[in-house]
Image (cartoon, rainbow, N blue to C red):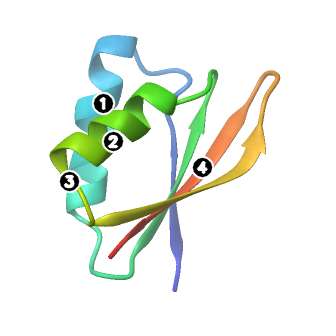
């Protein structure tokens, strides 16, 4: 399955989370997105866990220092 890459480094911070959640919601079950960010998106992980428990898997592919990449899989 193709991985949708979403690089949010150039997106204003206030628009990032809504865009990420919109992209996630448009994934089919089993769909994957790769989030590329300029900092550790751990707060986003906690938001996913609180608002969409049991609907995703989260796998770090790269952890800084300048770029973080996370594979988010829709269950």
Mark 4–mark 1 Cα distance, whole angstroms, equals 14 Å
Comparing 60 with 1, the one in front is: 60
Residue drawn where x is 42% and y is 40% of the image: 45
Query: Residue 54: which quarter of the image?
Result: bottom left
Residue drawn where x is 29% and y is 13% of the image: 14
The image shows residue 39 at horizontal and vertical percentages of 62, 21
Q: Which of the two labelled residues, at mark 1 and mark 3, occupies the earlier sequence position?
A: 1
Query: Mark 4, residues whose alpha carbon is within 10 Å: few (<14), some, or many (≥20)?
Result: many
Query: Which residue was labeled with disc 3?
Result: 52
Q: Secondary structure at mark 1?
A: helix
Q: Secondary structure at mark 3?
A: loop
CB under 8 Å between discs 1 and 3: no
Mark 1–mark 2 Cα distance, whole angstroms, equals 5 Å
Query: Which residue was labeled with disc 2?
Result: 20
Q: Is residue 38 left or right of residue 53?
A: right
Query: Which residue was labeled with disc 4?
Result: 70
The image shows residue 32 at horizontal and vertical percentages of 46, 69
Q: Secondary structure at mark 4?
A: strand
Query: Residue 67: which quarter of the image?
Result: top right
Mark 2–mark 4 Cα distance, whole angstroms, equals 12 Å
């Amino acid at each position: 399955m193709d991985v949708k890459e979403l690089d949010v480094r150039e997106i204003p911070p206030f628009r990032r989370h809504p865009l990420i959640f919109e992209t996630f919601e448009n994934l089919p079950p089993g769909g994957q997105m790769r989030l590329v960010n300029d900092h550790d998106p751990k707060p986003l992980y906690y938001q996913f866990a609180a608002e969409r428990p049991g609907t995703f898997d989260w796998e770090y592919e790269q952890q800084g220092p300048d770029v973080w990449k996370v594979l988010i899989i829709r269950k």
